[in-house]
Image (cartoon, rainbow, N blue to C red):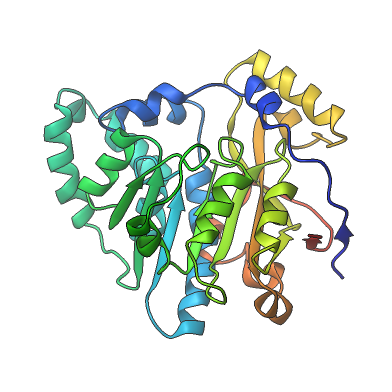
Amino acid sequence: MRAQLPLLQPPRYAAVNAVKADFTGIYRQRDPREYFRVLGSLDYVIPEIAGAVISQLISELISRKGRPITVIDLGCSYGVLSAVMRHGLNMDQLRDRYASPSIASLSSERLANCDVSYFAGWPARPDLQVIGLDCSPEALGYAHRVGLVDQGLVVDLETSSLDARAQDMLAKADLIVSTGVVGYVTEKTFGKLLAAFPAGREPWVASFVLRAFDYRAISATLARRGLATERFASATFVQRRFRDQNEYEDTLRLLQAANIDPAGKESDGLLHAELFLSRPHADAERVGVGQLVSLSSAGAARFRHRLRIVTGDDEELAA
């Protein structure tokens, strides 16, 4: 049974972001070496965990539609999620590659040329196209150049709108995914994305959201386009370790003030995210998110030790 949850006030994203470590600088580099150096030191793993889950959703959509599908990667940065879900790479492989001494001396230009060959050398699933969205021209430009995204759009939808060309590009998508951008983007971004789609052609939306962020304002925005949002209640998903003691202590205080229990999750020194899946009502009524996502699948087996299995029914967020 799915519990109907009342709509709360919009999330106080600024308060949460004031507590979180600021990694803005790593997304402004001409290549991903600093990204993997900094986040790799914190065991950043959410793209790999999310990629295994999203791949299950992709397979379901391909089966239903009987054709290849297109995914919008919201906040794609250097195309890391695409490397995982499209090429089957994992975060250890990517981190080790960019930490290699043979890579360290290369210019960004030379590294990009090498990465074109590197990613082309891995089998890629032919039934998936990826559109990358990010506000960083450096990160998105790299992802597009090395072939991790098929098309890219540099835009900040919190402050800008989509032009007709961008809307045409996005309107062909079947699934919107995000693995850490909620909190930096709000319901404004999701509302503008959904406005690109004609009525009756709304995509699925899968978001991995840190537990400190309230997703209800976004789910309400999606509901106005006919999408029902469910929270996957069977597990939470590790994002990374805390950067330092201050981030740890401040996050625990924030969670406790919001009546979110950090025991066994953030209290163990790890930031945890939850999965929210939004779909047209007919799709949501046909099968619940708990039946679509298997944590015992081959793709999920590698990261099971980085989950926290919890009990409880999947919940549908009331519009």
Q: Residue at x 66, y 26 (%)?
A: 14
* Res 131 quadrant in image: bottom left
Badge count: 0
User: As displayed, is residue 269 above or below residue 154?
Assistant: above
Asked if residue 59 lies left or right of residue 264, the reply is left
Asked if residue 125 lies left or right of residue 319, the reply is left
Q: Which sits in the foreground, 215 or 81?
A: 215
Q: Which sits in the foreground, 315 or 132?
A: 132
Rendered location of residue 242, percent (x, y): 61, 25
Rendered location of residue 114, percent (x, y): 14, 42
Q: Which sits in the foreground, 259 or 268?
A: 259
User: As displayed, is residue 118 above or below residue 296?
Assistant: above
Figure quadrant of the N terminus: bottom right
User: As displayed, is residue 109 above or below residue 1?
Assistant: above
**Residue 259 can be seen, yes or no:** yes
Q: Residue at x 30, y 29 (%)?
A: 33
* Res 282 quadrant in image: bottom right
Figure quadrant of the C terminus: bottom right
Q: Residue furthest front?
A: 164
Rendered location of residue 66, percent (x, y): 43, 86
Q: Residue at x 69, y 21 (%)?
A: 248
Rendered location of residue 18, percent (x, y): 64, 20
**Residue 88 can be seen, yes or no:** no
* Res 273 quadrant in image: top right
